[in-house]
Image (spheres, rainbow, N blue to C red):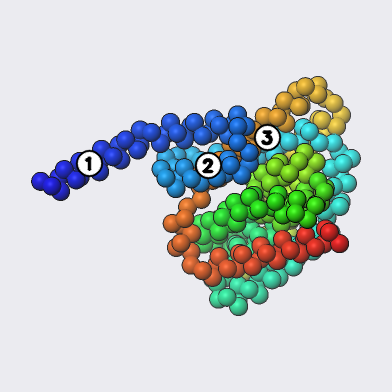
């Protein structure tokens, strides 16, 4: 009888939690969308919510992150101009090239040294060297990675991205980085686009423009990395995914540069895009699972941390000197 009452109590408790967690979930979404919190707090609120309640819409959140981030990035293009975008891309080209080549090379060596699974090590390396989750999603089918390796790589990269969103603006101020320097550093040293834009948004308007431009030009390196991965893993006939939203981002820049739309409309689009980014960061926070990360083991996490420290320090020294 006691066991029966204990069961009823637990059932009632879970029912109460289910009743309040959905309203709280949507309330936090609204807070992020209204811009009441900044980038780090948006991400932190999502993480704490999942830690306490668990995400009631986990699959839907993943899909929403995928689409909202691309929409927001394209929207930011309506606040940029062709001339400055080309100059920014040119400024970041050599640093992007060196950082990717060195990080991928180091990743291959560390994967062997730490005895990490080859597929998992390459996915972590790809996510660290280029653009986080997008690179992992693009490289995974090329090397025929299994779902477990993909999940672990995404979990590790999301964790490091979350940490970067909090610490990078502080480090930037500590070293007195200019808006231009910080935007360039964030675009190269932070993996995922959401955290790059989130950290730059926190630092300033110019940093946001530079970080977004360099980050998207860096994303195009998925193509040569995919070809390299095919040779490395000796796979054939796999399709290489090209991020289509980069083309839309360029179209948005053209529209703004030639004033096809009034400035109040383009300004409104940029404003909404920034709010969508905050909402995206909240959803990214809800996708971080401590239990999933515990199951990964120490060596893949150590690999990711070493690569992240390397690319962060290398790019910071390069930019400052």
Q: Is residue 2 visible?
A: yes
Q: Up-down: is 264 above or below 249?
A: above
Q: 237 or 186, which is in the foreground? A: 186
Residue lying furthest front: 174
Marks 2 & 1, CB-CB < 8 Å contact? no
Q: Is residue 238 visible?
A: no
Specify the quadrant that holds the C terminus.
Answer: bottom right
* Residue identifier under label 2: 45
Q: Up-down: is 35 above or below 135?
A: above
User: Closer to the observer: label 1 or label 3?
Assistant: 1
Cα–Cα span, label 3 and label 2 = 17 Å
User: Closer to the observer: label 3 or label 2?
Assistant: 2
Q: Alpha-carbon neighbours of circle 1 within 10 Å: few (<14), some, or many (≥20)?
A: few
* Residue identifier under label 3: 274
Residue 303 place in picture, x, y as percent: 60, 68
Cα–Cα span, label 1 and label 3 = 44 Å
Residue lying furthest bottom: 113
* Residue identifier under label 1: 9
């Amino acid at each position: 009888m006691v066991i029966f009452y204990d069961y009823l109590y637990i059932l009632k408790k879970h029912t109460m939690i289910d009743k309040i967690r959905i309203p709280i979930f949507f309330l936090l979404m609204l807070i992020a969308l209204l811009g009441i919190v900044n980038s780090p707090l948006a991400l932190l609120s999502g993480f704490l919510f999942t830690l306490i309640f668990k995400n009631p819409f986990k699959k839907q959140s993943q899909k929403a992150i995928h689409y909202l981030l691309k929409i927001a990035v394209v929207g930011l293009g309506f606040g940029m101009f062709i001339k400055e975008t080309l100059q920014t891309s040119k400024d970041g080209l050599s640093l992007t090239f060196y950082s990717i080549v060195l990080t991928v090379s180091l990743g291959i060596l560390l994967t062997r040294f730490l005895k990490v699974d080859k597929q998992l090590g390459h996915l972590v390396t790809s996510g660290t060297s280029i653009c986080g989750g997008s690179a992992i999603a693009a490289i995974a089918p090329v090397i025929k990675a299994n779902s477990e390796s993909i999940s672990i790589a995404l979990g590790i990269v999301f964790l490091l991205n979350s940490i970067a969103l909090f610490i990078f603006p502080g480090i930037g101020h500590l070293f007195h980085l200019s808006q231009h320097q910080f935007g360039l550093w964030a675009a190269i040293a932070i993996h995922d686009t959401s955290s790059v834009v989130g950290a730059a948004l926190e630092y300033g308007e110019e940093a946001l423009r530079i970080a977004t431009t360099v980050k998207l030009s860096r994303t195009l390196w998925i193509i040569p990395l995919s070809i390299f991965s095919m040779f490395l893993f000796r796979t054939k006939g796999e399709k290489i995914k090209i991020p289509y939203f980069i083309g839309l981002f360029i179209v948005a820049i053209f529209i703004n540069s030639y004033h096809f739309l009034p400035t109040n409309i383009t300004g409104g689009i940029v404003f909404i895009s920034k709010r969508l980014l905050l909402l995206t960061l909240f959803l990214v926070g809800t996708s971080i699972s401590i239990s999933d990360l515990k199951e990964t083991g120490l060596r893949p996490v150590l690999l990711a941390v070493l690569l992240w420290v390397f690319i962060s320090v290398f790019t910071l020294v390069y930019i400052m000197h």
